[in-house]
Image: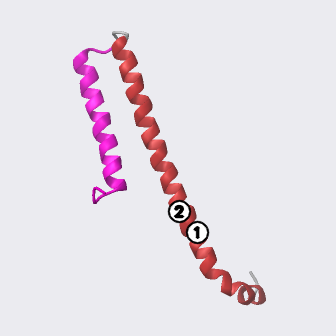
Amino acid sequence: MGLITGLLTLPLAPVRGVAWIGEQVAEQAAQELDVEARIRRELGRLEMEHELGNLSTEEFEEQEDALLEELQQLHAEEDPHGF
């Protein structure tokens, strides 16, 4: 960016900053949704494996508890104050 262009677009700097922050927030939200979707898919797969007899009840509950804990931690990070 040249000196003249830099000076002419200087008043737009706050707008670019707000746009960058918006992009960062959107990217973080997309990543969290991806994690939640993965956990929910895994829960569904576990249930199917259990119903098919490929997992014992004990194995199912152990893995389900771990995934539910991960999901709970994800939501706690989103809203640390519990609102």
Is 25 located above or below residue 53 in the figure?
below
- Callout 2 crowding tier (Cα within 10 Å): few <14, some 14–19, many ≥20: few
Q: Quadrant of residue 18?
A: bottom right
Majority SS type along the magenta span: helix
User: Most extreme residue toward the top, as rendered?
Assistant: 53
Give the x, y percent position of residue 80: 30, 58
Residue underneath mark 2? 24
Identity, as a three-letter code, of the amino acid under mark 2: Gln
- Cβ–Cβ under 8 Å for marks 1 and 2: yes
Identity, as a three-letter code, of the amino acid under mark 1: Trp
Q: Residue at x 25, y 24 (%)?
A: 61
Residue underneath mark 1? 20
Q: Is 70 in the magenta?
A: yes
Give the residues drawn in magenta, as a range.
Answer: 55-83
Give the x, y percent position of residue 29: 49, 53
Give the x, y percent position of residue 56: 26, 14
Left or right placement of residue 52 versus residue 23 in this view? left
Q: Quadrant of residue 79?
A: bottom left
